[in-house]
Amino acid sequence: MANHPPRPGSFVPQQNVGVLDSPEEVLSTMTREGKRRWLYPTPSHGKFTRRRRIVAWALILVYLLLPVIPVNGQPAVLLDFIHREFALFGIIFYPTDTLLLMFALILVILTVVFGTALLGRVWCGWACPQTVYLEFVYRPVERLIEGREHVRKRRDEGPWTWDKIWRKTLKISIYLVISLVLAHTFVAYFVGWDHLLAWMTDPPTTHWGFFVMMAFTTALVMFDFTYFREQMCTITCPYARMQSVLLDPDSLIVSYDPNRGEPRAKRSKKKIEMERQGLIPALGDCIDCGACVRTCPTGIDIRDGLQMECIACTQCIDACDAIMDRIEKPRGLIRYTSENALAGKPTRILRPRTVLYSALLLVLGALFVMALTSRGAYDINVGRSVGAPYTILPDERIANRLRFRVRNQTNHPSAFSIEAVAPAGVELRVVGVTPVTLEPGEMKRVETWVIVPPEDFTAGSVDGVFRLNFDDGFSTDATFRLLGPSE
Ligand code: SF4
Ligand code: SF4
């Protein structure tokens, strides 16, 4: 009976703890000499793979379109760190929206934590771009050009022949084209599609920085999907490392059912029939065919229990279901389940951590909506310009130089003018042209001189009130303390 011990770092369910008999076991993608073990996972063809393929192509479309399709005049998703502007489905966040951004970030983290507690690594197996592109774009191209797994393995281990050279060259060329598309899409999320288009159509010498950045991003994408592959999930990804704290015995996992499968043994269909007729002692349903291991894109054996390397891709479910059909046993020896269900206990959806997470999500979601809706259409700031606090004019009036900083947070162009309404006798002179025009999201600074008669000051100061009138009918007052002589 083959028995695969859990690997170091594996999250081992209770029933499998006893099988740890080789402390020297290494990562699934590494040989005992510490070299890379190249994986050749065989594709599965069951219902989960079909569903994942549909989801994957829908997501690829979404990933490609999100930085391109406009919502309220901005890309659906824009994370412009250079200009500190962020757009999410029509909501624009500015550097001044620190509170909103903080709420948004906490909400995202909490959603991931909550989702993992309930659904396990559903994100990894179904929606992570790493899995989606590797399993449904790069690997199919590889299979198409280089053939099936055993053929590829034999060719890779053999000498460099013309057949090997042209197939590898063609594959790398197609990978390069796909990687270029991915790199451009990725960069579009951070700079905006309009900038990207302009940079792409100009000669490289005009935008050397962009050219270098794109070459570097393309090289990274190529390295990941051509060489690094599953190691991104098993070695690099921090989310994978947090599974042991995010999952609990009620979380949804892909698991082998040892109660049904053990004791496992290789045997013929004839022997299974004899077991069914009670002619020989019945063994477990697992016939130790290894189909679940051969299909695993991270190279693990699901029968060793829940492991950090398992991305819950469901390929082993489909592979095992096909075997169960063949030996006329019920499907589901490997299935979506929970550790509690495997132990014969009920799976609880409502449990302290899920109740706490959902309560926190509700509270933070409400705070986010409140902060969002209380945010004004225009962000207005008044400050003193650099230089002397005030100037005494020849006619003895006092001049304060103020700077108005106004950002248009609406999704339409706007124009505004400023008037001074207090104290009595105040005069406002704007440096530059008024009304001041603002594109959606644009911020402008307006320099002004505020001139006040000396008798308006009490103990060296007086509150000035300024009215900003926008062409969309919005009007608001801003107050700023003006300084003057104290005598
Ligand atoms: S595919 Fe199913 S029957 Fe075959 S080794 Fe895996 S668990 Fe056992
Ligand atoms: S063990 Fe199964 S679900 Fe987990 S990564 Fe391997 S094939 Fe996918």
Image (cartoon, rainbow, N blue to C red):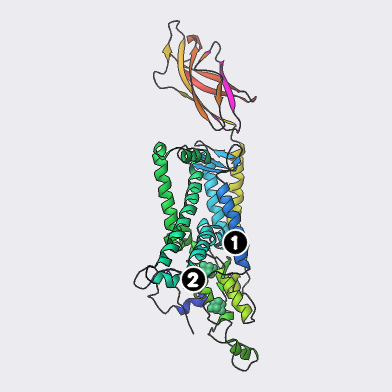
**Numbered mark located on residue 310 in the image:** none
Q: Which of 326 and 448 lies nearest the eye of the viewer?
A: 326
Query: Does the image show residue 125?
Result: yes
* Residue at x-position 50% and y-position 58%: 130
Q: Is residue 160 left or right of residue 45?
A: left
* Residue at x-position 50% and y-position 26%: 444
> Residue 203's spot in the image, x, y percent?
43, 38
Q: Is residue 93 above or below residue 48?
A: above
> Residue 455's spot in the image, x, y percent?
49, 9
Residue reaching furthest to the bottom: 279
> Residue 15's spot in the image, x, y percent?
52, 77
Query: Does the image show residue 258?
Result: no
Task: Look at label 1 and name its amino acid.
Answer: Arg
Residue 418 in which image quadrant: top right
**Badge 2: few (under 14), some or many (20 or more) residues near its Cα, within 10 Å?**
some
First in sequence: mark 2 or mark 1? 1
> Residue 379's spot in the image, x, y percent?
55, 30
Residue reaching furthest to the top: 395
**Numbered mark located on residue 149 in the image:** 2
Considering the numbered disc 1 on the image, is that residue within a helix, a strand or a loop?
Answer: helix
> Which residue is label 1 attached to?
53
- Marks 2 and 1 sit apart, C-alpha to C-alpha, by 20 Å
The residue range painted magenta reads 407-427
The quarter of the image that holds ligand 1 is: bottom right
Q: Is residue 389 above or below residue 104?
A: above
